[in-house]
Image (cartoon, rainbow, N blue to C red):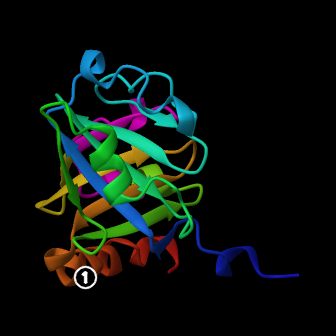
Amino acid sequence: MANRKSIPSVLVLEIEFSLLYQVHGLTTESCGNRLKEFGVHLLPAYGKSAVGDDFEILSNGPGMWMVQSRNRESELTLVHLRELLADTDATVTDLSSARLTVQVAGVSSRTFLKKGCPADIDSLESGDVISSVIGHLGATIHCTGDDFTVYVLQSFGTDFWEWCRLSTMEFNM
């Protein structure tokens, strides 16, 4: 049996997404039923997320959504998404290699995030999405129940990992 003190109360792990797109300028009205074939009937409201068949849509700003999938075989490719939205004013940008994506898990995950984020982390519920800062770095934070997915610019990855290293010391990491 492991010593309880040796089990970390927060884990910070990098996640590799095979697909990560930013959609800008799309309205709920112009989207209509375009994503219905993928299991999404409505775009999520600002600050919320919606789950499709093999992807998730995060509303990270007015008229802005991040589309993510861990399925390398997803049918929702960049080309397909652009084709679906071709007759709208939306733009689609591939962010797959532009973001560092990190999962923060464990019983102290909220306490850990509050060390560097001024947003009200305690009020976040499963499916909530916010844009804020963590350790002075811009971040998108997605609450997935007791865990969180954090997105930061890849170019700030080293700085973010250094902040994580220093901030996890008290959590027995």
Secondary structure type for disc 1: helix
Image coords of residue 91 (percent x, y): 15, 45
The vertical placement of 119 against 62, above or below, is: below
The vertical placement of 132 against 48, above or below, is: below
Badge 1: few (under 14), some or many (20 or more) residues near its Cα, within 10 Å? few
Judged left or right of residue 54, residue 47 is left
Q: Which residue is drawn at 25% across and 82% down?
A: 162
The vertical placement of 64 against 15, above or below, is: above
Quadrant housing residue 29: top left
Can residue 96 be seen from the camera position used here?
yes
Judged left or right of residue 147, residue 165 is left
Q: Residue at x 52, y 64 (%)?
A: 70
Q: Which residue is drawn at 73% across and 73% down?
A: 4
Residue kind at label 1, given as amino acid type: Glu
Which corner quadrant holds the N terminus?
bottom right
The answer to which of 91 and 144 lies nearer the viewer is 91
The vertical placement of 40 against 103, above or below, is: above
**Which residue reaches farthest top?**
29
Image coords of residue 121 (percent x, y): 36, 40
Residue placed under numbered mark 1 in the picture: 162
Quadrant housing residue 128: top left
Image coords of residue 30 (percent x, y): 25, 21
Image coords of residue 133 (percent x, y): 17, 53
The answer to which of 117 and 172 lies nearer the viewer is 117
**From which residue to which does the magenta span run?**
112-131
The answer to which of 134 and 126 lies nearer the viewer is 126
Judged left or right of residue 136, residue 123 is right
Q: Residue at x 28, y 25 (%)?
A: 46
Q: Does the magenta stretch include residue 123?
A: yes
The answer to which of 151 and 120 lies nearer the viewer is 151
Can residue 127 be seen from the camera position used here?
no
